[in-house]
Image (spheres, grey):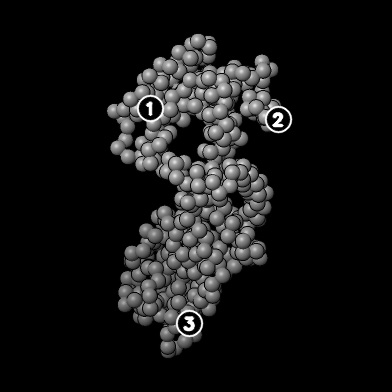
Amino acid sequence: MEVSSDFTEKCQQHLLWKSSDRLLIAVSGGVDSMVLLDLIQRLPDTLRPWYGVVHVNHELRAVSMEEERFLKEQCRLKNVPYFSRHWDSKKHPETGVELAARNFRYAFFKETMQVVKATHLLTAHHADDQLETILMRLVRGGQLEGMTGIQAQRPFGIGLLVRPLLHYSKEQIYAYSKARHLDYYEDETNVDLLYTRNRYRQKIAPLLKLENRQVLTHFKDFSADLSDVLFLANQVIQQKSEQILLESKSDFYELDRSVLLSCEPETQRQVLKHILIEKVYHAYPVEMLRKQVEELLGLMTGTKSNAQLDLPDGWKARREYQHFYLEKNKFSESLLLRKERKLLLGQWVSITNGARIGLFQIEANTTSPFEKDEHIWIEPSKVSLPLLIRHRKPGDRMTLKGMDIGHKKIKTILIDQKIPLKAREEMLILTDSLDEIIWLLKYKESRLSIQRETDKIQYILVYQR
């Protein structure tokens, strides 16, 4: 089928735009964009909406000014609205010129769309561009979605970015240009092997075409099939992710470990990767995320019921028996209490979440005003003041209430009581000035905790929530 009539049919078949829409065509002056412009001009009146040309002079080549004058004159002769901008050569970066040029170009396109209220931006990417793009992304690596290559359309600015020539090869574009006697400028940098795409275009793509003349069609079909499969897979992944995420905040996520581990290994990996990409790491390379996924699964399935894993950017994964959390490390009140603090007789010391600890002397034959609070009684002669409030340290031991001799490691006590790892990090220990542990706050009392004897003066150690 002749390209022009086939192009018209595809515009109708795929409903790329309506006659009431407004199109901006990105035209460089090269053969691809000049063919696209000509095809739009030749559409039937019922399919050809308002359109204008948008052009960027990158000031990268000696003929850039000549190309701009040529294109501007072509638009004047055909009464086509024309919008252009220069990328000042003085502002070109020393490295990464290709990416910088693309960013400048598309920023201008987006701005112009808003000014003229365009609904579509059209670019002249074609089937050979698709082949090169998929090959480069496969070699470079990245998310599977990227391996679908160039999409026929996607959201852009206030409307859509559309590539109407993706079905056509470079060979067809040249043939159409020749048949229509179109004028265009050939960019000499397209053969410069310093550019990555040119190496694929000049060296690799020709070999593939020699292997199979239908390679462009196969890559086009691969892109379409992979897009379809990913669409279906993402529906399942999204549904499973919603089941597994029990709590979702900007800096804290609780995952249902048992539900995730009941899924197939393939689903486990994809769901975890989805959560990391969508919730935690929005701009990280997928290669790094694959490593994190494997480490998270290792933490979930390991033999340790209480364990944690440090992740990049201050994130932490934490397993507490059947619970599993992803959280951003923050400076909290508890972290500010890592230093020992003194507790004097008759004094309150504020701790986390509005709670406080106090030490008071209760006279003989008097009633304590703190009976409704958590508290322990202490024999004054058995402790050395001031008391100290601190977090646990490696090797901490205490003699438990009811034990006259011997010590038990704090670590063993916490494991026996199945205390979650986060609670272990935040728990407070009260000792006397000789560092004998009196109270593992909220969990265990030491041998120094005694019964109230109303006929004696005693200390009361009080914890108020």
Q: CA distance from mark 2 to mark 1?
A: 36 Å
Looking at the image, which residue is at 41% across and 19% down?
68
- In which quadrant is the N terminus drawn? top right
Query: Of the residues shown, which amino acid type is indicated by label 1?
Result: His
Q: Is residue 305 above or below residue 328?
A: below
Looking at the image, is 62 positioned above or below residue 128?
Answer: above
Q: Are marks 3 and 2 in contact (CB under 8 Å)?
A: no
Q: Amino acid at mark 3?
A: Lys
Task: From the top left corner, tell me how far across and down residue 30 is, in percent.
Answer: 46, 26
Of the two numbered discs 2 and 1 on the same chain, state the one appearing first in sequence. Answer: 2
Query: Compared with residue 240, is residue 386 higher up or lower down, i.e. above or below?
Result: below
- At mark 1, the secondary structure is loop
- Please report whichever mark, 3 or 2, sits nearer to the chain's N-terminal start: 2
- At 58% from the left edge and 60% from the top edge, which residue is drawn? 269
- The amino acid marked with disc number 2 is Gln
Residue 401, label in figure: 3
Q: Judge by depth and name the residue closer to the eye, 382 or 325.
A: 325
325 or 385, which is in the foreground?
A: 325
Q: Which residue is mark 1?
A: 58
Which element is circle 3 on?
loop
Q: Mark 2 = which residue?
A: 13
Q: Which mark is residue 328?
A: none
Q: CA distance from mark 3 to mark 1?
A: 80 Å
